[in-house]
Image: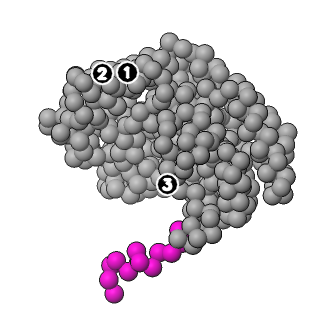
């Protein structure tokens, strides 16, 4: 038997393609804006993570172009050797200031930031405690570490305390999403932080979906709850509100110094491209200088949440710009995705293993730059198709 047989025998995706229910790798041939050209068709984007709508901002694009002209297209090496530019250091200083930490370290992707930090930080005979709904990059970081991963039920503080109680006196790191990327709810950081302190554990918060959404000037969930000093490690990404690609870890300087010399995902990866680095710097500046963007994001979010609930949709525990519509079985999710696509609305269906069986959902997410006319047009389609499919 060949190791390749499993590839030739993998037929699930091709079956979905044949049925016309394959929602992945859609081809977008335009800017990532409130409207996109997808598979040659103009569509209203209701599934982007560009929460502040900065991917098309002229200053963000100009910053990237200027950096490419000055530095070229890439760094031709890792940060550890020949790949550290002055703008990398400038960006790290800005990120540390933004989230209220002494230092920061930029990675080429958010995935690598989580994998690189967790795998380096947690050693043999130490423990990582994760929420069962944490992002895959956190789980993979746990698997690559020499520590032992333990999980607690989603946002269930009694479940977390039971895990911590069993480990009392042992070294442990709690890693949790600030905003959960599918459910759209916020981690109970005040309770998590209190339990970490009670049991002597350390705390890491993944701010991927909360940067630009929560906290003063978009600094994230830890800032939102006033818990930055009690959060040992803050992780964030550039591919959402900050309109580029990459990720970072922010912490006290000795922790960042340690990661610089121990994080394999950093040491053995080429560094963040100059254009991406400069774009993030521009996005941070705009985010802080234009707080009305965050206000508008929440205005759009509150409006859509109210309207979805009024229609009878089940939005679960969401309280953020990520609003899931729980539809139940997989065929409901695929049919709704297909019908909305026919009507010019781009959304993301979420099916197992990302969610439990019969827990399929339509993931919608909103931007500060969505107009009221666009939101109302989308709501009209959700109302018609939801009734057509018997979901509402």
In reply to whether residue 96 is colored magenta, the answer given is no
The residue stretch that appears in magenta: 1-13
- What residue sits right under mark 2 in the picture? 66
Q: Quadrant of residue 275?
A: top left
- What residue sits right under mark 1 in the picture? 62
Q: CA distance from mark 2 to mark 3?
A: 30 Å
Q: Nearer the viewer, residue 277 or 162?
A: 277
**Pointer 1: residues within 10 angstroms few (<14), some, or many (20+)?**
some
Across and down, in percent, residue 60 comes to 42, 23
- In primary-sequence order, the first of circles 3 and 1 is 3
Examine the rendered structure and indicate whether residue 25 appears above or below residue 13: above
Q: CA distance from mark 2 to mark 1?
A: 6 Å
- In primary-sequence order, the first of circles 2 and 3 is 3
In reply to whether residue 10 is colored magenta, the answer given is yes
Q: Nearer the viewer, residue 351 or 368?
A: 368
Q: Nearer the viewer, residue 233 or 58?
A: 58
Helix, strand or loop status at disc 3: loop
- What residue sits right under mark 3 in the picture? 25
Helix, strand or loop status at disc 1: helix
**Pointer 3: residues within 10 angstroms few (<14), some, or many (20+)?**
few
Q: Quadrant of residue 259?
A: top left
């Amino acid at each position: 038997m060949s190791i390749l047989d499993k590839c030739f025998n993998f037929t699930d995706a091709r079956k979905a393609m044949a049925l016309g229910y394959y929602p992945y790798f859609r081809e977008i041939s335009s800017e990532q804006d409130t409207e996109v050209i997808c598979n040659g068709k103009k569509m209203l984007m209701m599934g982007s993570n560009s929460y502040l709508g900065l991917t098309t901002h002229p200053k963000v694009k100009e910053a990237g172009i200027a950096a490419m002209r000055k530095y070229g297209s890439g760094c031709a090496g890792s940060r550890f050797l020949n790949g550290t530019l002055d703008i990398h250091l400038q960006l790290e200083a800005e990120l540390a200031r933004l989230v209220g930490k002494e230092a920061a370290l930029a990675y080429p992707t958010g995935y690598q930031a989580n994998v690189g930090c967790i795998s380096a930080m947690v050693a043999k005979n130490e423990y990582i405690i994760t929420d069962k709904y944490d992002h895959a990059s956190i789980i993979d970081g746990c698997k690559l570490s020499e520590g032992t991963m333990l999980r607690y039920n989603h946002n269930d503080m009694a479940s977390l305390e039971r895990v911590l109680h069993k480990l009392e006196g042992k070294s442990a790191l709690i890693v949790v999403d600030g905003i959960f990327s599918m459910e759209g709810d916020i981690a109970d950081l005040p309770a998590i932080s209190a339990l970490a302190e009670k049991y002597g554990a350390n705390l890491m918060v993944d701010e991927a979906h909360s940067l630009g959404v929560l906290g003063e000037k978009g600094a994230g969930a830890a800032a939102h709850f006033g818990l930055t000093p009690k959060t040992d490690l803050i992780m964030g990404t550039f591919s959402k509100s900050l309109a580029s690609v990459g990720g970072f870890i922010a912490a006290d300087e000795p922790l960042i110094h340690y990661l610089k010399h121990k994080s394999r995902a950093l040491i053995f990866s080429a560094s963040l491209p100059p254009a991406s680095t400069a774009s993030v710097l521009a996005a941070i500046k705009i985010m802080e200088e234009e707080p009305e963007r965050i206000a508008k994001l929440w205005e759009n979010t509150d409006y859509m949440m109210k309207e979805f609930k009024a229609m009878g949709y089940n939005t679960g525990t969401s309280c953020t710009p990520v609003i899931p519509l729980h539809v139940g079985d997989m065929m409901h999710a695929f049919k709704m995705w297909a019908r909305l696509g026919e009507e010019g609305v781009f959304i993301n269906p979420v099916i197992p293993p990302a969610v439990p069986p019969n827990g399929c959902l339509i993931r919608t997410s909103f931007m500060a730059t969505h107009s009221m006319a666009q939101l109302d047009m989308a709501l009209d389609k959700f109302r018609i198709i939801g009734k057509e499919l018997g979901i509402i």
